[in-house]
Amino acid sequence: MPPSLHTRVTEDVGRSIVDGTVPAGTVLLSDEIERRQGVSRSVIREAIRVLGSMGLVESVKRVGIRVLPPSSWNAYDPTIIRWRLLGPGKGEQLRSLTELRSAVEPMAAELAARHAAASVAAELMDVADLMRAAGDSGDLSSFLELDIRFHRLVLRGSGNEMFAKLDGAVAAVLSGRTDLGLQPDRPHENTLQLHAEVAEAISGARPQKAREAMERIMRRTYAEVQPTWAADPTSAL
């Protein structure tokens, strides 16, 4: 199904802001966007409303639509993450999200081993088994879906509502790694085993084991994607 008109406009304008084609401080006019995109004013209003909710733009009375700097963006918005991964900021985006995951997910695994419901622990075991089957068969599409599901379960199983809200960002970066060709053709045996160990530790209520296994997953992930940002300087905000 083709995207709706406002989705297309949101995508075109949003990506041009995120990739820097339209820099911060630029004032966009609804009439110009309407003419360029060939859509109605109501479509433009809806697209601008969505971009405003992401922190990309603000409507200024009697001025127009002002493009906001990256410091105003919702850095956890999955759509912004996807756009950054598609543009020149992909290395910086991968770095920041991988560092965030490395800090959060081991603690989430430890907490899940303490607090996750039995149904969540059982589901994690099932998903780990399915990941192994998909990995062994080389079904990367299914593996990606299962990998996203696995990490979402760990974050939600932690019992920390703020960790749970990171699931969209984690899903976006896992999908982005696949889209960018940064995943191996077939998941490493070590990766499959570590996911199984996390699931087993959570199911067995062994917090330290769960943390250690997730730390090993994140160290491997960091090593695999670090070359994408190795040449980019990291600066203070």
Image (cartoon, grey):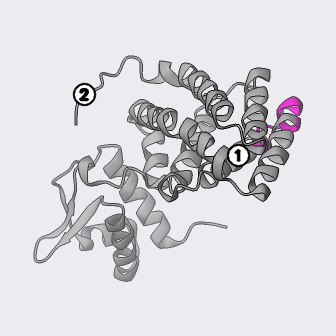
In the image: residue 126, left or right of residue 145:
right
Q: Quadrant of the N terminus?
A: bottom right
The residue positioned farthest toward the left in the image shown:
62
| Crowdedness near tag 2: few (<14), some (14–19) or many (≥20) residues, C-alpha within 10 Å | few
In the image: residue 138, left or right of residue 155:
right
The residue range painted magenta reads 133-142
Q: Which mark is residue 24?
A: none
Write the residue at 70% across / 24% down: 184
Numbered disc 1: secondary structure: helix
Is residue 186 shown to the viewer in this render? Answer: no
Q: Which residue is mark 1?
A: 150
* Viewer-nearest residue: 190 or 224: 190
Query: Is the residue 181 above or below the residue 20 in the image?
Result: above
Q: Which residue is mark 2?
A: 235
In the image: residue 192, left or right of residue 234:
right
Q: Quadrant of residue 235?
A: top left
Q: Quadrant of residue 13?
A: bottom left
- Percent across and percent down for residue 55 are 30, 60
Write the residue at 78% across / 41% down: 204
Q: Are marks 1 and 2 in contact (CB under 8 Å)?
A: no
| Crowdedness near tag 1: few (<14), some (14–19) or many (≥20) residues, C-alpha within 10 Å | many
- Percent across and percent down for residue 189 are 80, 22
Mark earlier in primary sequence (1, 2): 1
Magenta stretch holds residue 194:
no
Write the residue at 67% across / 44% down: 113
Numbered disc 2: secondary structure: loop
Mark 1: amino acid = Phe
